[in-house]
Amino acid sequence: MHGNDARPASTTLPLPKGRPDHYWEDLVAGDVIRTAGMTITDAHLVQWAGLTGDLVSLHLDETYAATTPFGQRIAHGPLTMSLGLGLMTQTGYFSNVVAWLGLDEVRALAPVFIGDTIHVSATVELARETRKPDQGIWKINYSVLKQDDSTVMTFSSSFIMKRK
């Protein structure tokens, strides 16, 4: 033993821990994944506009946005979608993506305001094998929700995943 350490000295180091590996087999059709939340800030809107060149007054100009039916600035639709994809990535289920196949059926249903907290509830629509024995496909339906669980956006996205 070393000093005040009550544990015996070990000659083997513990294995490092990190995000678990998830593979195609880890999700089946009907599974639901719920993400952590993220509160939308002014910085999100300004940085997204600068990154993408999407400099629309509805997102950046408080005076103009006050004259719109929303009465205030709203988040860019593609920002909301990208944050939804990112929140799903944080779940760890995408550690073995081979390829992203695309995005379909994007619908913006309600505005996201500065101060809203969004999260994703996603349902696996399809989990199918491919001709390649080391790969499978997931099609996932996303619902981006606000803090009151109202849906602000829906879309689907498909991925080729490694198999075990």
Image (cartoon, helix red, strand yellow):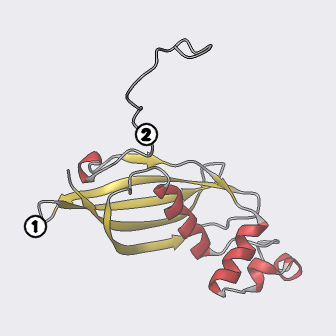
Which residue position holds label 2? 16
User: Which sits earlier in the primary sequence, circle 1 or circle 2?
Assistant: 2
- In the image, residue 7 sits, relative to residue 64, either above or below, namely above
- In the image, residue 27 sits, relative to residue 70, either above or below, namely above
Where residue 82 appears, as percent x and y from the top left, is 54, 69
Disc 1 to disc 2: CB gap under 8 Å: no
Tag 1, which secondary structure? Answer: loop
Q: Which mark is residue 131?
A: 1
Q: Residue at x 46, y 49 (%)?
A: 91
- Left or right of residue 149: residue 23: left
Q: What type is the residue that disc 1 sits on?
A: Arg
Where residue 44 appears, as percent x and y from the top left, is 71, 68
Q: Nearer the viewer, mark 1 or mark 2?
A: 2
- Left or right of residue 103: residue 86: right
Q: What type is the residue that disc 2 sits on?
A: Pro
Q: Nearer the viewer, residue 77 or 35?
A: 35
Q: Nearer the viewer, residue 158 or 30?
A: 158
